[in-house]
Image: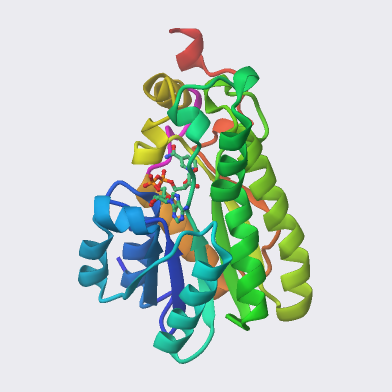
Amino acid sequence: MSYGLLRGKKGLITGALDEKSIAWHVAQRAHEEGAQLVLTNAPVALRLGQPQALSEKLQAPLFPADLTSVADIEKLYEEALRHFGGPLDFLLHSVGMSPNVRKGKSYPELDYEFYLKTLDVSAISLHKLLQVGRRKGAFARGASIVALSYIAAQRVFPKYGDMSDAKALLESIARMFGYFLGKELGVRVNIVSQSPTPTTAGTGIGGFQQMYDYADRMSPLGNASAQACADFIVVLFSDLTRGVTMQTLYHDGGFSAMGISEDVLNG
Ligand SMILES: NC(=O)c1ccc[n+]([C@@H]2O[C@H](COP(=O)([O-])OP(=O)(O)OC[C@H]3O[C@@H](n4cnc5c(N)ncnc54)[C@H](O)[C@@H]3O)[C@@H](O)[C@H]2O)c1
């Protein structure tokens, strides 16, 4: 069902790789709610994933950009602003990758080159997007920015490795920039901390299925789906949440408030 929540709004969606991606669902829901979109993903994802199919379906131009590259981000904003003829009303950061996790390097044995890459791709990319966007006047007054995190920023999930550090940094960047962009432009910056979700990035974490099943049994509502996450993010993009900023908002079926559940106790 559409409520027209984003009618007339213009947004940039990063990270829609395939139809499992959280960003894919967000793009579809934002489109249903009346938004005009620009999509972006890493050049390699354009070759390996299906972002082109989403671009055609939603009639949203797709511009390649490696979000660790300030030059790529500058070009991305120039193309997006030219396409829209004005600034953005919302932006989704939905990007994450850890070479350490990919190569099975445990947290005590991190490779430091990989570690820097993890932080750059998964967290500093948000700072770069916000810094360049601010400099280019890319955000409309009252715009809404959302990035995705996981509760491993607060608690220990050993197999999440250096992504835990990246998510903690990401949440701090959202808070800090939320202050500056809020003061200057009334722009909101929030984090959505999502349940385990079976996507390419999610299932790359060691023991994903066990973590998924455990979280599902711990959460009174069960794991929150990517579709439900998209619904929540669309509300955060809308004017209905214009007083919410600098928050980590848990979209996790109740997991983050639990100690132990009867389902887990009873095996
Ligand atoms: N899947 C989960 O369990 C889960 C849970 C909580 C939070 N998240 C977060 O949600 C976000 C989206 O991940 P997803 O689960 O939809 O997986 P996904 O694999 O579908 O999306 C990750 C995206 O990051 C993009 N990306 C990687 N490196 C990039 C770069 N250098 N420049 C531009 N784009 C780049 C990929 O191409 C891909 O589109 C991530 O921040 C992830 O950490 C996922």
- Magenta region includes residue 224: yes
Left or right: 162 as drawn, with respect to 82: right
For the C terminus, the quadrant is top left
On the image, the x and y values in percent for residue 71 come to 54, 69
Image quarter for residue 150?
top right
Picture layout, residue 111 above or below residue 248 = above
On the image, the x and y values in percent for residue 264 come to 48, 14
Q: Residue at x 63, y 53 (%)?
A: 124
Label total for image? 0
Image quarter for residue 258?
top right
What secondary structure is the stretch in magenta mostly built from? loop
Left or right: 94 as drawn, with respect to 140: left
For the N terminus, the quadrant is bottom left
Q: Residue at x 43, y 22 (%)?
A: 206
Q: Residue at x 63, y 67 (%)?
A: 130
On the image, the x and y values in percent for residue 257 come to 63, 32
Residue projecting furthest to the top: 266
Residue projecting furthest to the bottom: 85
Residue projecting furthest to the front: 113
Residues in magenta, as a range? 218-225
Residue 3 seen in render: no
Picture layout, residue 10 above or below residue 209 = below
Residue 47 seen in render: yes
